[in-house]
Each structure stands twice: as structure tokens, then as C-alpha cells.
Image (cartoon, helix red, strand yellow):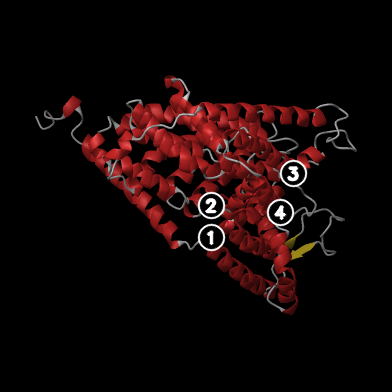
Amino acid sequence: MQGSNLPNGSPPDSNFDKATQNSRMQKFLKGVEWLGNLLPHPVILFVWMSVLLLVLSAVMSYFGVSVIDPRPEGTSGRSADGMIEVVNLLNGEGLARIVENLVTNFTGFVPLGTVLVALLGVGIAEYSGMISAALRGLVMNAPKKMVTFTIVFAGIMSNTAAELGYVVLIPLAAVIFHSLGRHPLAGLAAAFAGVSGGYSANLLLGTVDPLLSGITQEAARIIDPAYTVGAEVNWYFMIASTFLISGLGYFVTEKIVEPSLGEYNPKDADDASVLETQIEKVSSLEKKGLLWAGISMLIFCLLLAWTVVPADGILRNAETGMVSGSPFLKGIVVFIFVFFAIPGYIYGKITGSIKSNQDVVDAMSNAMSSLSIYIVLVFFAAQFTAFFKWSNLGSVMAVSGATFLSDIGLTGPLLLVGFILICGLVNLMLGSASAQWAVTAPIFVPMLMLTGYAPEMIQAAYRIGDSTTNIITPMMSYFGLILAVAMRYKKDTGVGTLMAMMLPYSMAFLIGWTILFSIWVFVLGLPVGPGAETFYPAR
């Protein structure tokens, strides 16, 4: 018979169909990579977009483009005739405004200062080796049955220290899996999924929270000039997301990715020495340092609770007595700084990695030097955001978009799901979370605000789309590094191979996280963070 020689009674065309599907997937992934490569560097992208925005402001102003202002009378910034008109920024008045405010646009850009302050503390903890030791201790001491879950969880938690998860945890996870007789690429994939796919989830507030909230606040002020968005506004939802992503990452690794990789063949390694790599265990001195660092964290948290939990706490809102709008929430970035700086210093003094005050200064200087490209990016992103606001293009697009969505009846969960998918698609081409949000927030935040949703909730939805496709796009800044690590264990690993391996995580995270978001917001009606609203206007 024609199919009698096929193994396991497979249908005659099963191998052909599988090959066809793989070929289509490879073509799709290569297409994404090709399109992404057409985009310039995010800094150059902001330059061209700013120039385009200025030209559009002149053209649309010439043709008298305007929309009805939906804000009630008496609202700050509302014109007397109740219309929002596009303002020409290429005439004498517009150019004078640009020249006069170029510096203040940069220095007044909210995410800049908040990220710099938060990273000072994280820099001390990272320089001292505290975060690296904590991650190694967490992963290496996990029970064998919990290794996969712990690696994904540790990857998520590593995001408080920027790139540490990429540099330390992902190579470590591959070594751990190999030492357990498992496929090293499965360990790499699990760690990569946690570090990058779960980028926005965490039990702690990190540098990404003030970064995104600052951009969200700038965008929200296109509609409401007095609106404030704190770094903590997504905290509740991100805590729950941490356990969801850890569980999904465990399931995908154990049931899909590792079985598909099959048994590891040491001959596939590009360099046999990589298979002899020994795991650096946490020393007794490092354990002592972690113990006292943990005690200092606990003391700090108790002192902070003493200022907030009692009804007469000194960091509560002096007027209302509530936590909402309190100095505690407004100063959350300061507490992030202290939360990492003090334990990091104590750990460094005990282990000897910090010997003098000069080392503390060097730690903070190193942290700042790692932000050089971010500072350059912020300069141009701040100009783009300011031009968007001055020209009224953001308001016009928001009102027009909101009207269109209302006319077609697209509201509720379906609207937010569509927004998440758009963010995930854009992320394939523009891998930087800050760059992407700086581009899309001035459009989508005002638009969705006018459809009745609060900026805090919109930002939470954005973080889902942005995180879940990080792991399948070559545009992500650390994708090349991960590929290099993978090639050490399997020399024929290519870009498409790595993307295909991470695709099940991306799909599982996108579907699972979106379902959690929909239930959280639309079924249970829970706030996504302290003092965060779901609907606008609601305050």
C-alpha cells in the first residue's frame, strides 16, 4: 500500500503538511524581520516623525481641520468657540515656541527624572552583586520539580534590575537545565520567556513603572492638563500577572517546548567547553550578605508601613486622610531608590564588593552610563510629544478616533483586546518599550480616554501587548545576545529557529494575559493599581 512504510500509521501527507506549515512559519518570521529592519533606529525614527508632524500641522492648519471639543465648558484649555483646531507650528510663532522650549521639553519630560532616580538605587544593588546572588540562590536552591517555574519567576523578578536577567539568568538557566540532564535550550527559553515575555509583570516596582507612567501622564494631559499618573498605578494587576506568567511559562516549557526539542545531543554544541561550565553557587559570605540585606529591606518596609497604614500616618493625604493622592504615592520613586540602595550597600559592605563611599559613587555612575542611549532617545521623544500637544493633532486624532469607535459600536472588552493586539503588532517592529509607548501613547491614550477609559487601565493593556511579543522579534535589543547563547549549545540555531521556539510562549502569554485583564477589569471591576481608575472621568 502507498502509506504502509510510514511510521506509527501516519497519514501519507502528514509530513508534507508539517513541512509546509514550517515553511510558512519561517516565511512569516523572515517577513517580520525584514520589515523590522526597514525601520531606522528609534532616535532617528523620532526625528523623522517630529519633522513629519510639523509638516502635517502646517498642511492641516491651512485646510482648517478642526473637531468639536468634547470637554465641558470651563475646562482648562478649552477654546471659547468649543472647537479644537490644528495649530501651525511651521509659521513664525510656532518656530519661536519650538526654539524657546526645546530644552525645557527635555528637562521637563516626566519619565526622565523618575527613571534616573530609581536607577540610582538599583545601580547600587546591582553593582554590589546583591541582585545577581539573589537570582542565583533562588534558581539553584529550587526543588527539581519547581526548577522551570522558579526560572520563569526569577526572570520576571529580574526586571527590577534592567538587563541583569538577560546577562546573568538566561545563560545560567541553560547551564542548570544541562546539569539536570535536560535540554539546555529549554532552560534558555524558559528564562527568556520570563525576562522578556513577562517584562511588565513583577511583585516589586521597578524602573519600567515610572518610565511608562511618565509617558502616560504626558499623553493624558492632552485631554486633561491636570491629570497625574503615578508609578504604582498598575501594581495590583502586575502582581497577579507575575504568577499567571510564571504558571504559563512552566506549562509551555514542560508540555510544548522541551518535548519538541527532543533529547539533547552534546555534539550539537558549537564549543564543547560550554557543556563543562560549572554553576557558581552562592557562597556563605554571599548568603550572609543576602540575610542582612533582607533584614534591612524588612525594617524599611515596616517603617514605611508605619507612615502609611495608621489612619494618622504622616505620609497619608493630609486633606483626606487617604492613601490616594498621598505623599507616599507621589514619592514612590524615592522609595524604590531607598529600597534597593540601602540593602545593596549593606550587602556590598558585608561581602566586600563595596569597600568605600567611592564605590557607591561608582555604582551610581555606572548605572547612569548605561542610560546614555535612553537619554538621547528621551530628548527627541520629548520634542515629539510636545509638538503633538502644541499642534492639537493629538486631540484631533483622539476625538476623531473616539467618534469612529462610538459610531461602529466598538466598546468594552473587544476594544481593549484590539488595542492589545495593535500594541503587540507594533512591538514586532519597534522593540523598545519606552520608544513604542512614546509614539503610540499620544494617540491612543487620549482616544481611549474619550471613549471612557482611564489612562491607568489603558497603560496596563499596553504593557500586555508590549511584553508578549518581545520574545519573537529580532528588533528587541537583546535578541542577538540570546541567539548567541543559544548557538553555543546548538550551533545551527538561527533567528527563525529562536523565534519559532519562543512563539508558543508568546501566544500563551498573549491569550492568557488578555483573559486575565478582561476578567480583572470588566468582570470583577478591580482597580489595576493603588488609586487607579478604570473609567474616565471618574474623579
**Distance from the alpha carbon under mark 2 to that under mark 1:** 8 Å
Dot 3: element? loop
Q: Which of 54 and 298 is in front in this view?
A: 298
Circles 3 and 4, Cβ within 8 Å, touching? The answer is no
**Distance from the alpha carbon under mark 3 to that under mark 2:** 28 Å
The disc label shown at residue 110, or none: 4
Residue type, numbered disc 3: Tyr
Pointer 1 or 4: first along the chain: 1
**Distance from the alpha carbon under mark 3 to that under mark 4:** 22 Å
Residue hosting label 1:
42
Residue hosting label 2:
432
The answer to whether residue 501 is above or below residue 72 is above
Circles 2 and 1, Cβ within 8 Å, touching? The answer is yes
Circles 3 and 2, Cβ within 8 Å, touching? The answer is no
**Distance from the alpha carbon under mark 4 to that under mark 2:** 18 Å
Pointer 2 or 1: first along the chain: 1
Residue 108's image quarter?
bottom right
Q: Where is residue 365 in the image (x, y as percent from the top left)?
A: 62, 52
The answer to whether residue 20 is above or below residue 86 is above
**In this orientation, does residue 521 appear?**
no
Pointer 3 or 1: first along the chain: 1
Left or right of 481? Residue 83 is right
Pointer 3 or 4: first along the chain: 4
Dot 1: element? helix
Residue visible at 73% across and 79% down in the picture: 92
